[in-house]
Amino acid sequence: MIKSMTGFGKGEAKGKSGIFTAEIRAVNHRYFDLSSKIPNGLVLLEDRIKELLRKDIKRGKINLFLSYRSPEKESESITFDKEAVNKYYKILSEIKKRINTKEEIKLSHILSFTDVIVHDEKSFDIEVMWPTVKEAVTRAASDCNKMREREGKALHKDLSTRVSRISGYINSVSNLAPGVVAEYKRKLDSRIKDIVKNQAIDQARLETELAIFAKQCDVSEEITRAKSHLEGIIKALDAGEEAGRKLDFILQELNREINTLGAKANDIKISRIVINIKSELEKMREQAQNVE
């Protein structure tokens, strides 16, 4: 069964090293593209996380958010940089004197500089923490995949319904196509009789014209290829593997055959059916953009 590229998943794991929570948000994208936001001390695990996710997610724009809580519930060490405070106060005093303002230098002015307050970051042992991180990310990916599979079922149903509808349209064209030449012959006979009246009609010339017309409007090859492409779409939908790129290619080829069919048909009824087919194809191409 196909999967959607859109999904959300959350996973949490607790170990001796702490509690990790992973959130995954996935949207459609041409390739696998990972953006991660993880604690600074765990940046070296990013490649491992990427390889882990690629096992379950083949294509899409993936945003990973990983957070950490210490098991000891330690309060974060926060202090201030005395040298920075003195430096900024001196600079602000000089600016105040230069522009000759009576405005007082306030604490809020000093605190507006981000390097005044210092957060002491906890050091991480990535090898100790990796099993817990792996478990949290795996759970998040599994949760995300469940949502992607649910949406994949909806996409499968919609695309299969449209394939069936287009197949019906193709059969209608197949039934109408033989009558196009017969109708053209009838109209051509009528026009020639009006022109030449009682004069003899050159049957050989007439048959040649009909043969040329029949060849120009013969859509049997396009119908055969269109049916083959529809079968290819169903196989791709039921293959149970990455199908997005294959669907996109088949739909492009199918659209090309339908355009050719419409150009060659020379029949108003077939032209109307072709419009309906192209409308269905456009909707299918939009849906296929979200298939993994």
Image (cartoon, rainbow, N blue to C red):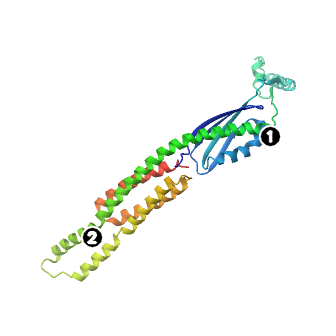
Label 2 to label 1: alpha-carbon separation: 76 Å
Image position of 223 with respect to 198: above or below: above
Residue 245: percent from the left, percent from the top?
55, 55
Type of amino acid at the residue the image marks with label 2? Val
Instruction: Give the residue pinned by disc 1.
Output: 127
Type of amino acid at the residue the image marks with label 1? Glu
Q: Is 138 in front, or is 85?
A: 138
Most extreme residue toward the left is 198
Residue 19: percent from the left, percent from the top?
72, 30
Most extreme residue toward the right is 83
Residue 12: percent from the left, percent from the top?
67, 33
Q: Is 108 in front, or is 226?
A: 226
The image quarter containing residue 67 is: top right
The image quarter containing residue 108 is: top right
Res. 172 in view: yes
Instruction: Give the residue pinned by disc 2.
Output: 181
Q: What is the number of callouts on the image?
A: 2
Image position of 149 with respect to 122: above or below: below
- Could you tell me which secondary element the residue under label 1 belongs to? helix
Q: Which mark is residue 254?
A: none
Left or right: where does residue 94 sit relative to residue 160? right
Left or right: where does residue 197 sit relative to residue 277? left
Residue 91: percent from the left, percent from the top?
83, 26
Res. 251 in view: no
Left or right: where does residue 52 sit relative to residue 234? right
Question: Residue sitting at 43 percent across and 54 percent down?
Answer: 281
Image position of 105 with respect to 172: above or below: above
Question: Residue sitting at 79 percent across and 22 percent down?
Answer: 96
